[in-house]
């Protein structure tokens, strides 16, 4: 029987299809626009395999979508691991995407695009609250989203504890999908050093300046220690995805260097005899701040 089932759902226009295609490329068996009532039938069909399955279920299913909660409960009764990935984006981004594609929102009817989005948000509110992973695509292009999904779902299997360390710039907004947000603007800003200004946190000169600042070594040690304590709690609650957001003013120097250092420290760390951390640094705003 299938080892695990990942349900891909979320807002129309947020990038569900991109997520599904990326997972398929990573070795998952993906079924698009599956009526929820057929979820258990798909699991029965995999009785003699150990494939990992991903299904896209969304409001295109109209009245069928209303039975999703019961179908998800049935999956658990079969003893199959079940995860929900909710793909989201801000209203203004969704409106812009629908306008550029010249397609109506599936719940729009004769009203505005925003009315359709509001109806869909109300319909998906409970599902989003119970999702194992929320992926906000508001500020991701298709290639960045594909890379993020590939890092999360590799070789048709979920990592025991997957940690994305996301650098960002406060001037561009706090990431909506962050579990923890840390402000590193207390560190002296390399922007004010003429020779470092054109470089970024991936350059060794900038990284050395940031990591060598007076308070940074203690900050990093305490942050890693804090992470270890809360990670154990996350695992007990069944949460296997964590996004740690590290912010500075523009997302170019300090947050990038700190995110890279934290990824190096956390990747491969053993939380117990059978649980290991897989950590990756992602730089949302690198290149936007000139």
Image (cartoon, rainbow, N blue to C red):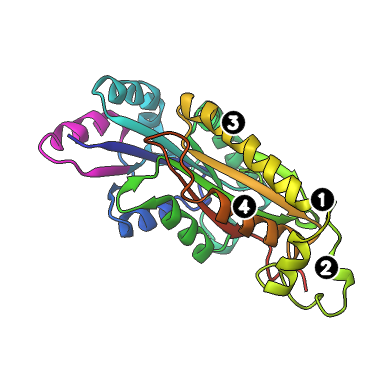
> Does the magenta segment cover residue 138?
no
Q: Earlier in the sequence, mark 1 or mark 4?
A: 1
Q: Provide the residue designation for mark 4.
A: 262
**Cα–Cα gap, marks 4 and 2:** 19 Å
Q: What element carries label 1?
A: loop
Instruction: Specify start and end residues of the magenta stretch as a single range.
Output: 35-54
Q: Is mark 4 on a helix, strand or loop?
A: helix
Can the viewer see residue 110 in this picture?
Answer: no
**Cα–Cα gap, marks 3 and 2:** 31 Å
Q: Which of marks 1 and 3 is nearer the N terminus?
A: 1
Residue drawn at x 72%, y 57% as measured from the top left: 255
Q: How many labels does the image show?
A: 4
- The quarter in which the C terminus is drawn is bottom right
Asked if residue 14 is positioned above or below residue 121 in the image, the reply reads below
Q: Which of marks 2 and 1 is nearer the N terminus?
A: 2
Give residue 153's position: percent from left, percent from top: 39, 50
Marks 1 and 4: which is nearer the front? 1
Q: Provide the residue designation for mark 3.
A: 230
């Amino acid at each position: 029987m299938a080892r695990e089932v990942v349900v891909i759902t979320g807002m129309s226009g947020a990038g569900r299809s991109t997520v599904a295609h990326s997972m398929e490329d990573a070795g998952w068996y993906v079924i698009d626009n599956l009526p929820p009532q057929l979820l258990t039938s798909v699991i029965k069909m995999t009785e003699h395999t150990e494939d990992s399955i991903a299904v896209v279920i969304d409001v295109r299913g109209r009245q069928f979508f209303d039975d999703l909660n019961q179908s998800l409960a049935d999956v658990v009764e079969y003893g199959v691991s079940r995860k929900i990935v909710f793909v989201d984006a801000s209203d203004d981004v969704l409106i812009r995407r629908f306008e550029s594609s010249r397609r109506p929102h599936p719940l729009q009817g004769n009203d505005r695009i925003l009315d359709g989005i509001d109806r869909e948000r109300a319909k998906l509110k409970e599902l989003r609250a119970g999702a194992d992973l929320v992926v906000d695509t508001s500020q991701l292009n298709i290639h960045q989203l594909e890379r993020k999904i590939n890092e999360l779902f590799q070789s048709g299997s979920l990592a025991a504890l997957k940690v994305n360390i996301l650098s960002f710039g406060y001037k561009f907004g706090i990431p909506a999908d962050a579990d923890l947000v840390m402000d590193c603007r207390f560190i002296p800003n390399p922007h004010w050093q003429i020779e470092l200004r054109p470089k970024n946190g991936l350059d060794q000169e900038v990284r050395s300046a940031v990591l060598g600042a007076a308070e940074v070594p203690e900050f990093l040690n305490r942050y890693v220690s804090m992470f270890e304590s809360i990670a154990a709690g996350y695992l007990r609650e069944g949460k296997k995805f964590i996004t740690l957001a590290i912010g500075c003013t523009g997302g170019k120097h300090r947050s990038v260097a700190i995110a890279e250092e934290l990824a190096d420290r956390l990747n491969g760390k053993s939380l117990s005899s059978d649980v290991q951390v897989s950590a990756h640094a992602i730089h949302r705003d690198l290149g936007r701040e000139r």
